[in-house]
């Protein structure tokens, strides 16, 4: 009996601590993402804590074609874990054979990104999740329809209840998808092992390629493809064309000096994510390296860091060997990232 | 029995503390605001990115990128005691944003609210990244000024850029300014791999005879005005931008160029306290 007062106060206190948060069961089990020492802490928004239930629900939704108009296309149709969450297509395919206008982007370490899509038109993992669902060239759904289908599904209502303490809503749908995507961390490549201190993790050729990659006078790749994510998340015009059909970042900002600028993609798992560039116009890494060695096609907005570089054949091979040392086979095989 | 009462009271107090933790932005009674403002200019006019300007050699150039770190910002009390305001902030003078750990709205200024009211004799700050912070983005959250998202990190071997200036210049003999055919890339930085504090610069603006006050309900603006042309000359030397058009601060000539640009920036800057 004498313990009642402290216990009552303790529960009040727990309630008070929870009142700072917005949504969902507060004592849910947290999902732990293991990170190497050379990665920053995983950013998780306050209103969407990473819980085991949210991640599990997000994963189920990610692989479920229920989100598309005719139940034929899921997120995973264009973002297949086997290819580091891309497809092998130049342009991705949506419902009824619709052809998308850009190359599918890998979903790797996106918890750290501060904008999404090739033109950065979206600011958060949660918000971006809506767009493929309603885009007529992708899943072509109506959001109200999607929520109705989820409400009438035999298990989803219970899963949403478990993860969020309520029935399916658009907000909870995108939060679940974002929670799953936030766990897709790739940090176990040969390069990562090298950084962690294993000097034998890279071959001689990979090491030479790495030195070229990080060279301030010649390779310069690291300026935009900055470690540890091998992107600095900026927008650059890489001189792919002298005239662009796709205006890129200008579509978002309306500024002429953003024409032909696209998000710098991560190079992690690049071995698995071809074809390359925003329009999938290059099939091989050899073509990509040749493009940069040539110094681009001199668009007026082209990054001033791109210039003609004389690479020997051996140097090109070394550079490509290093790019492949950014591959993380454990990531593409991770059962946590694949459907049950 | 006493001990249970004690634990109850302690929990109650803890609860009250937690409640107040949710209540953000409480003002101490006697506090004012201090604003650190960076104003890049060319020839006395506000600098505009992408606009053509002439350097003192008469060559036309434009800048499309201008970012710099301001670190260890503090106010100096009349006693000499220092009041730290921020460890590091990144000023993007093209996009007009300041990254300060908590994202900040548009404007090339940084506002400190709740500065204790009182009389102050000066402002101190550093230009660049102090050695103890020049580590790696692994140490910083993604909204931090030193996060990888700011495009100011080179690599684990070379640390952070301190100042980033990028643009183009007319390098032609005729100097008509019709075509800006030469790129300009000035990335200063690197103390972590050279001896400490070769390029990080401490700046003191002290005026003990003319102390200024910060008081409740008032916002005191401190303006650092920097003429961009002035980055490229001093009493002894003029940097020919069309020839010395590039530095990544690699030890040697490039590093020396970075030091000269930094020193020119510091010696040419004007500090203004409007009040």
Image (cartoon, rainbow, N blue to C red):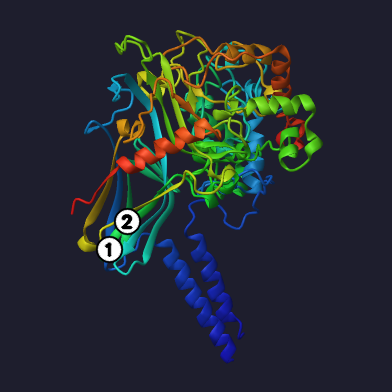
Q: Is residue B181 left or right of residue B136?
A: left
Q: Give the chain of mark 1.
A: B
Q: Give the chain of mark 2.
A: B
Quadrant location of the N terminus of chain B in the rendered image = bottom right
Determine the residue positioned at 51% across, 51% down: A23
Q: Residue at the bottom extreme?
A: B1
In the image, residue A18 lies at what x, y percent? 51, 60
Identify the mark at residue A67; answer none if there is no mark.
none
Determine the residue positioned at 54% across, 16% down: A102
Identify the residue position indicated by label 2 in the image.
B123
Asked if disc 1 and disc 2 are in contact, CB closer than 8 Å, the reply is yes
Q: Is residue A310 above or below residue B110?
A: above
Residues under labels 1 and 2: Cα distance? 8 Å
Q: Is residue B191 left or right of residue A63?
A: left
Q: In this view, does A306 lie to the left or right of A219?
A: left
In the image, residue B150 lies at what x, y percent? 48, 37
Decide if residue B57 is in sight here.
Answer: yes
In the image, residue A84 lies at what x, y percent? 68, 27
Q: Is residue B165 above or below residue B194?
A: above
Identify the residue position indicated by label 1 in the image.
B120
């Amino acid at each position: 009996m004498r313990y009642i007062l402290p216990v009552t106060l303790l529960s009040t206190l727990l309630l008070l601590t929870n009142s700072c948060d917005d949504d969902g069961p507060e004592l849910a089990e947290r999902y732990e993402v293991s990170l190497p020492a050379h990665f920053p802490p995983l950013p998780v928004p306050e209103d969407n804590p990473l819980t085991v239930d949210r991640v599990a629900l997000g994963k189920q939704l990610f692989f479920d074609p229920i989100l598309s108009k005719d139940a034929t296309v899921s997120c995973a149709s264009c973002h297949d874990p086997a290819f580091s969450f891309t497809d092998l297509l130049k342009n991705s395919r949506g419902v009824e054979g619709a052809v998308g206008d850009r190359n599918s982007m890998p979903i790797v370490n996106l918890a750290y990104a501060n904008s999404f899509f090739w033109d950065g038109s979206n600011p958060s993992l949660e918000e971006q999740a809506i767009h493929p669902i309603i885009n007529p060239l992708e899943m072509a759904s109506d959001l109200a329809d999607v929520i109705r289908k989820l409400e009438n599904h035999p298990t989803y209502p219970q899963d949403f209840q478990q993860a969020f303490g309520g029935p399916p809503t658009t907000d909870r749908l995108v939060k679940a998808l974002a929670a799953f995507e936030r766990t897709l961390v790739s940090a176990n490549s040969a390069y990562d092992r090298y950084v962690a201190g294993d000097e034998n993790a890279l071959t001689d050729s990979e090491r030479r390629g790495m030195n070229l990659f990080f060279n301030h006078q010649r390779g310069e790749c690291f300026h935009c493809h900055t470690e540890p994510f091998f992107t600095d998340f900026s927008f650059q015009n890489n001189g792919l064309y002298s005239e662009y059909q796709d205006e890129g970042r200008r579509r978002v900002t309306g500024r002429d000096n953003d024409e032909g600028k696209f998000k710098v993609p991560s190079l992690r798992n690049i071995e698995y994510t071809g074809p390359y560039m925003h329009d999938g116009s290059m099939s091989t890494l050899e073509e990509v390296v040749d493009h940069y060695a040539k110094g681009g096609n001199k668009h007026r907005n082209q990054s001033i860091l791109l210039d003609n570089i004389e690479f020997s054949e051996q140097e090109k091979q070394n550079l490509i060997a290093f790019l492949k040392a950014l591959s993380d086979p454990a990531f593409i095989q991770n059962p946590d990232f694949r459907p049950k | 029995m006493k001990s249970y009462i004690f634990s109850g009271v302690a929990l109650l107090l803890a609860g009250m503390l937690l409640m107040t933790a949710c209540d953000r932005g409480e003002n101490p009674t006697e506090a004012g605001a201090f604003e650190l403002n960076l104003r890049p200019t060319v020839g006395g006019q506000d600098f505009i990115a992408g606009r053509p300007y002439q350097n003192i050699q008469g060559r036309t150039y434009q800048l499309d990128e201008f970012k710099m770190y301001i670190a260890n910002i503090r106010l100096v009390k009349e006693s000499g005691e220092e009041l730290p305001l921020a460890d590091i902030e990144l000023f993007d003078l093209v996009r007009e944003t300041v990254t300060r750990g908590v994202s900040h709205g548009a404007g090339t200024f940084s506002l400190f609210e709740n500065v204790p009211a009182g009389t102050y004799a000066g402002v101190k700050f550093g230009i660049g990244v102090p050695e103890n912070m020049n580590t790696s983005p692994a140490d910083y959250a993604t909204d931090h000024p030193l996060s990888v998202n700011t495009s100011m990190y080179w690599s684990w071997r070379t640390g952070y850029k301190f100042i980033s200036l990028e643009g183009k210049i007319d390098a032609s003999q005729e100097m008509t300014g019709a075509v800006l055919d030469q790129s300009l890339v000035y990335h200063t930085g690197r103390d972590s791999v050279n001896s400490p504090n070769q390029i990080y610069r401490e700046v003191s603006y002290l005026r003990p005879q003319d102390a200024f006050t910060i008081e409740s309900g008032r916002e005191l603006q401190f303006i650092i005005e920097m003429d961009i042309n002035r980055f490229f000359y001093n009493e002894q030397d003029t940097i020919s931008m069309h020839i010395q058009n590039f530095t990544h601060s690699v030890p040697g000539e490039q590093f020396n160029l970075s030091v000269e640009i930094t020193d020119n920036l510091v010696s040419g800057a004007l500090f203004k306290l409007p009040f």
